[in-house]
Amino acid sequence: MSPELAALLSAVADMANVPQHPQPRKGDRRDGSVYSPTPEIITAVQVALITGRPLLLAGPPGCGKSSLAGFVARILDFAYLEFVVTDESSPQDLLWNVDVIARLRDAQLATVGEQISPLHNYIDPGPLWWALDPASAARRGAAEDAAVSRPCSMPVYLKDYEPQGAGTVLLIDEIDKAESSFCNGLLVPLGSRQFHVTDIDETVENGSDRAPESPLVIITTNGERDLPDAFVRRCVVLAVEGPDAERLEEIARLHFPAVSQDSGLSARVQELASRFAKSAKDHASTAEFLDLISVMLTLGDDSDREQWQLIERLVVEKSSVRRNLFTSW
């Protein structure tokens, strides 16, 4: 085992003991500053780092799959990239695109006899290119000694975070939103960590001398569509289940330190956790439960029983529109 990999595995093993500094919570937290990893998650991340395989997290919406990526990036001191899949997404979006509008504009503005800039100046590297080989992405695939009139920089998704390490964590979020063709188009890039940029006849490859650091790719699915077997075969797969009552309490205390400092609040959180845990009849996602705690802390004792029942229906139960997606997990 290389010293670099040993250091990464050690950092991951210590994830549960890393000091965390929660900020006021509004909406879903994706900045990676707060997370409570389970032993299963820690082991899964280690296995993904050792094998170089993507980590596929499967579980119900709101259970914390997406927020793991930013947390791991901070732990490993890696750059962080993300791509949120939609039903219109193409695997090409993760690799590269050509800015044909800019090239057409420059061609129209060029004087007679003036040579148009080389095509690589109009290549826009995608998130997977940045993850596999950031040096060539910054040159838009041009040779190291080539002139690049439009150099580019890696996108920044965590505004308050400046990584010092050489690696990258890439989140491909909600991959089940796309058709199976999206997954099939990523079999080679994710499986062999390389792809060919046909527009400029350049191969992007990780693991070479110029791109030695292997990225950690974390993929999430809510299970709305079955993923192709060939795609799943290339991944390390972990099913992330909804938390039980004890874990809900732990997560609430991590996000809201005031809960641990007030016995009355702690008792109320414990009661809510037992009602909305995975084993309960009307269980909530982790994100919904945290929203409920946030409302409880803000309103304090100002809400009466009838109002609080309404709050629970608004934030957690949503019985009039919720589909029973959780029963399959």
Image (cartoon, rainbow, N blue to C red):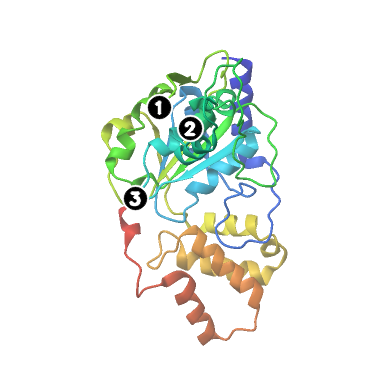
Inter-mark Cα distance, 1 to 3: 20 Å
Horizontal and vertical percent position of residue 309: 49, 81
Inter-mark Cα distance, 1 to 2: 8 Å
Report the disc number at residue 189. 1
Residue at the disc numbered 2: 128
Crowding near the residue tagged with mark 2, few <14, some 14–19, many ≥20 C-alpha atoms within 10 Å: many
Crowding near the residue tagged with mark 3, few <14, some 14–19, many ≥20 C-alpha atoms within 10 Å: few
User: Contact, CB < 8 Å: mark 2 with mark 3?
Assistant: no
Decide which of tag 1 and tag 2 comes sooner along the chain: 2
- Residue type at mark 1 is Pro
User: Secondary structure under badge 1?
Assistant: helix
Horizontal and vertical percent position of residue 49: 51, 27
User: Secondary structure under badge 3?
Assistant: loop
Crowding near the residue tagged with mark 1, few <14, some 14–19, many ≥20 C-alpha atoms within 10 Å: many
Tell me if I can see residue 21 in this picture.
Answer: yes
User: Secondary structure under badge 2?
Assistant: helix
